[in-house]
Amino acid sequence: MTIAFDNSYARLPDRFFARVNPTPVAQPRLIRLNRALADDLGLDADRLSEPEGVAVLAGNRIDPHSEPISMAYAGHQFGQFVPQLGDGRAILLGEVVDRHGRRRDIQLKGSGSTPFSRQGDGRAALGPVLREYVVSEAMAALGVPTTRSLAAVATGERVRRERWLPGGVLTRVASSHIRVGTFQFFAARGDGDGVRALADHAIARHYPDAAAAANPYRAFLEAVTFAQADLVACWSLIGFIHGVLNTDNTAVCGETIDYGPCAFMDAYHPATVFSSIDMQGRYAFGNQPRILQWNLTRLAETLLPLLADDEAAAIAAAEDILGRFPGRFERRYHAGLRAKLGLATTQEADIALARDLLVGMAEGQADFTLTFRRLADAAADPARMDAVRALFVDPTRFDLWAPRWLERLDAEGGDRSARAAAMRAVNPIYIPRNHLVEAVIEAAVDRDDFAPFHRLVETLADPFTARDGLDAFARAPEPHERVLQTFCGT
């Protein structure tokens, strides 16, 4: 089989990447192929499932139209700038144009060392491969812009981390892998031509309308800023915590990228942190909008010479664009909160109503996902409010809040069942809860049992529709099941 790669990034100057082939693995075994995504990409899923196709997904065979590269980038990691990072365990096989005319990267993660590996082995343990497959596909089903997972392959080899673990390779699909850190790589070297060439490429690929603007680079910065504001609003509405929101993990296309120690909250609190390496809570749930604005400021710094000839004018233009981030985020987030609460119209007090609920949830340790889902039931039948109340360790604030919400719904009017259906369409019942993800990883890694992994992926593919026999996927974890820390796994 062959893949119709058309590799625009590989046609950029050589300093943008290193040409490197994947390192073959011992015994590649296909764990899961995302057949729907393969079809969307114009790929033959049946042939990808055959040994020749699995060899491509494992890195053992190079498609004749592939031009494998590892991309150069830099980045701020927990606020500290590292001038060279790059794809240390990932190789971009090439780009395809999908059935909708969209250009998509196909990349292997865990495919061997590259010039950017920094003495690492370039491999991935199977656990992080399965985690990214589960969470990225769940995010797509939840309607969040995200990279996708095309395939998970076991390598038949073991990698050394805290202990010896089975290895894996993930085939990741993205609109592109251009990061804020990619721009920083060239800016840190004083390579203005590189910054301009990268910006021109990103504009043509992601924001072609910006090319017609009076200043395309200002329009590009604005488009990226708004895309990231919309993205973090999506995260905030589903309780998602990225975990390592460095500038090298911020994609200019506006997709969620790099699922390392990511997690979904169970009990709501804005200070929630799961990542074992986030000691100071820099990337806590409630900090994510501020951090993304900080990351975008770093992007703006790299673009200053392109924004205006005069430095003061360039800084003023950047500040104007970045200053619109909070407003864009709040509009998207507030609209989402209204929808989650079943409010189709807008009243001035709505956001205060939503925030008072969130304060009560934080104080009462209420489950984020279940609170909103059960409110949908209560919107149809107020007698079911007790099931919401039961989620609160201390329901004092909730008891004060609930009558206000019901009064607001009564004032709005409309059909109760229709409102409940609209709420269920934006409030998922199934999310990739940490204890579920850890359970499928344990079964796969320790017992070579992938049935739980497949069942979880299939359940999360339709997160808004309650189905019989899936109660275990909807409930919050018992105290002994709670996952308090997540790990990068690299």
Image: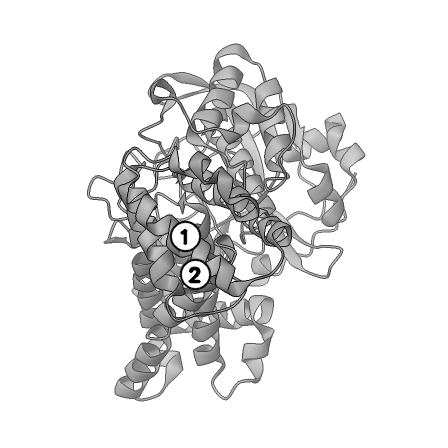
From the top left corner, tell me how far across and down residue 487 is, in percent: 35, 31
Q: Residue furthest left?
A: 280
For the residues labelled 1 and 2, say whether their Cβ atoms are less than 8 Å apart: yes
Numbered marks: total:
2
Visible in this render: residue 59?
A: no
Amino acid residing under circle 2: Tyr
For residue 187, above or below residue 308: above
Badge 2: how crowded within 10 Å, few (<14), some, or many (20+)? many
* Spatial CA span between label 1 and label 2: 7 Å
Side (left or right) of 339 relative to 95: left
- The residue indicated by pointer 1 is 236
- Which quarter of the figure is the C terminus placed in? top left
What color scheme is it?
Answer: one colour
Residue lying at 59% horizontally and 54% vertically, measured from the top left? 419
**Residue occupying image coordinates x 41% and y 45%:** 239
**Amino acid identity at mark 1:** Ser
**Which of 239 and 8 lies nearest the eye of the viewer?**
239
Q: Residues within 10 Å of mark 1 (few under 14, many from 20)?
A: many
Instruction: Write the residue at 34% across / 36% down.
Output: 392
Label 2: which residue? 333
Tell whether 81 sits left or right of 418. left
Q: Residue at x 49, y 32 (%)?
A: 131
**Which one is earlier in the sequence, the residue at label 1 or at label 2?**
1
**Residue 8 visible in the shown view:** yes
SS class, disc 1: helix
Q: Secondary structure at mark 2?
A: helix
